[in-house]
Amino acid sequence: MDSHFDVVVFGTGLTESIAAASLSKAGYKVVHIDTNPYYGGNEASLTPDELTQWCSRIPPSKPNCCDYACKSQTGTVQSSRQYSLSLSPSVIPSSGSLITSLIASGVARYGGFRLLDKAAVYSSGELKTIPGSKEAIFKSKDISLVDKRRLMRFLLFASGDFESAKELEGRSEMPFIEFLEEVFFLNQDLAGTVANALALCTSPKEHTILALQRTRQYLRSSGKYGPSPFLIGHYGGLGELAQGYCRTCAVSGGTYILGRRVLSIHDMASPTNECADTTTPRFKISVDDVSEPIFADLIISSDDYLPQELLPVDVLGSAPSSSVETSAFCIAIVDQPLAFSKLSSQVPLPEVDADSAHSTTQQSPANDDISTALIIFPPEARRQTNGVVTVLIEGEETFSCPRGKHILYISTPCLNLSSDANESLDPKDILRPYLMDTLRLLSNGPIPEPAFSAYYLRNLSTSNLPLSPKERVIISPPLSSHFATKGDEAARNAETIFWEVVKRLPKGDGVESLWPPLEEDQNDED
Amino acid sequence: MAAEAASGNVDKSVQVKLVLLGEAAVGKSSIVLRFVSNDFQANKEPTIGAAFLTQKCRLEDRVLRYEIWDTAGQERFHSLAPMYYRNAQAAVVVYDVTKAASLEKAKSWVKELQRQANPNIVIALAGNKVDLVTPSSSAAPPTPSPDGDDEPDDATATPGETPSAVAEVESLRQVPRDEAQAYATEAGLLFFETSAKTGEGVVEVFTEIAKKIPIEHILASTRGSGRNGGPPGRPGGQQSGVNLDANATQAKNACNC
């Protein structure tokens, strides 16, 4: 092969895959390398067999910004290939950077999507449905008139451009619930419901600005494709989309090398003269089982691929005090039917108004047809070690599992950890009670024991990683753990990376847009 | 028509996803180009720059609409994504009759398909570049251009193996037809020898596949409740899926393929 590339991208996580596709479409010669035999990196969709292997793999020898530790895995399933289990379960807001990117890049055509059927909050022993929008606030009988006014005032505020509003001044890092109580005078219950059900806060201390941004996105997303503001990607979600972006990159000429170890990455620039000569390539990369070395002028990578000398000093030398966010995850497969009929009563928040196209009676899929659901367990006083617990359920209509099976993804941020707690921290201790609660709430008979389950931790170092330790090295930052924002984050990060590359490695005739206009598909007439 | 297709209401037209497989440079893209545009480009660059190509294929009273996925080069380091195989109802595995190793590679792709793809997939084995080994009597003979520029050089023929005289032609064949046919029969594959350059055998590959595709089954699973049979050919089928483009403000009049 012609082995001199403009850009080498390491890792096929969603961010890197979007960046690779956009650069390839813009005319850059891209080689995309992943040491894993599967696409998607930390966002991969795996079969249960692959997940079992993933769980038993050897942990990396050096600390990375984002590390996973699988603590336990039990069970096997028949027809493993019919499952797509996401390492990074997520819902996609109908209005946001990822959707925009999917449409503009044409990758949407590779993916399939389903609207989230139901969302519910756990409240005093019951699951209560969360409505999709704000219109019917006036119809709710559960909220007093005064509270309705206050809530409406808040929703109006949250759906607008609040960034410079005086209400937010000096309060953007305030815990969101306090903000709701102090500025909008919402009572504690209502504030909690808003924080959990609309703002999708995962921790009671979450900063107001982030919660407001999610609330705004929630409000702007609902109604776009249907009553729910969220879409679920088929075949495991983000991992499938990463494959779609990679294919788009390949179709535009990108070269793909998966499942090969990267033996060395050598910076050929002289220390005195960083990027003088443009004709000789800057980096020399050897990859196992690829006979010729690969040359490239610029590297895009998640930090775990880069050798020490290409990393900014403070990443790895950083003291453990640079805050680490730990989240606990559980993936479980059950093969009994789930009784979604139990998700019928409503939280005291607006339901979509009855005249709208998606009114309650027409909108709600018959309970048998419910294939996806989101259940939120608000933080409890008796469980100090975790924040909000999110349960995402996917059934056969997402094509992620065979008929009659369901996949449950459960996650929560781990809170109040002592500095050395991580070794002894067991995600199973934290999450199994919620798994069993969920199954109990959704079953009519005996509580099914999951056929397969895996529990793991994700440690995300939030030290401010510089985007670029060197002119020709761009680090793609790991995604946050929030199930509703990481896809959009990936799209935004990829866009930033794209423009950085365009700036640092200009193309002859200039690049005008992230995604060139899609061409009409040819030869449709025969 | 694009509009019809977008509405998903094309009567009698069945969408069939077909994937191409085979070693690099055996002429996969050229076969598609011949089938779709009845065209051939000598010295074509590797891979076609399209997500997939579509071509209708008429079969008695039915119209099949092939959605043909090219490997886009991802086969080179064996890095095809599961997405590629997903819901493929047909596959054409291509080898080069002048390269024995390419048949071995084709066999490994067949195994890969049996492992990864839909169990009912219809697989055709195509020995391409047969123009290089056929005395120019049958089919439309490749008229050697006098200036000999791109002479019998196939689209993606490996440099150095370019034949220059008809006399040498038979000796270029490294895969006897019988051998490949025997393998195909044993493995339950359709078998053809093709030339993307002359067009020989190309259309037959697609029409024979069309005859073998369980059309009724596909119709049932896409039109029905979506629960009988396997997942529909296109995810995002009418009932449960969401078409992202449908609500896009600048929705184009593109076909939704």
Image: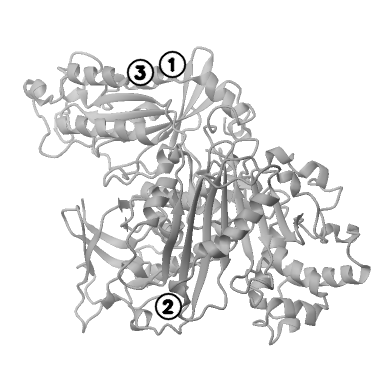
Residue A231 locus on image (x, y percent): 62, 51
**Does the rendering let one see residue A249?**
no
Mark earlier in primary sequence (1, 3): 3
- Residue ID at (82%, 43%): A361
Residue holding disc 1: B211
Residue holding disc 3: B204
The amino acid pointed to by label 1 is Lys
Whole-number angstrom distance, CA of label 1 to CA of label 3 = 10 Å
Classify residue A406 as left or right of residue A423: right
Residue A275 locus on image (x, y percent): 25, 76
Q: Under tag 2, what secondary structure?
A: loop
Q: Determine if marks 3 and 2 fall on one subunit.
A: no
Residue A258 locus on image (x, y percent): 31, 52
The amino acid pointed to by label 3 is Glu
- The subunit letter for the residue under badge 3 reads B
Q: Nearer the viewer, mark 3 or mark 2?
A: 2
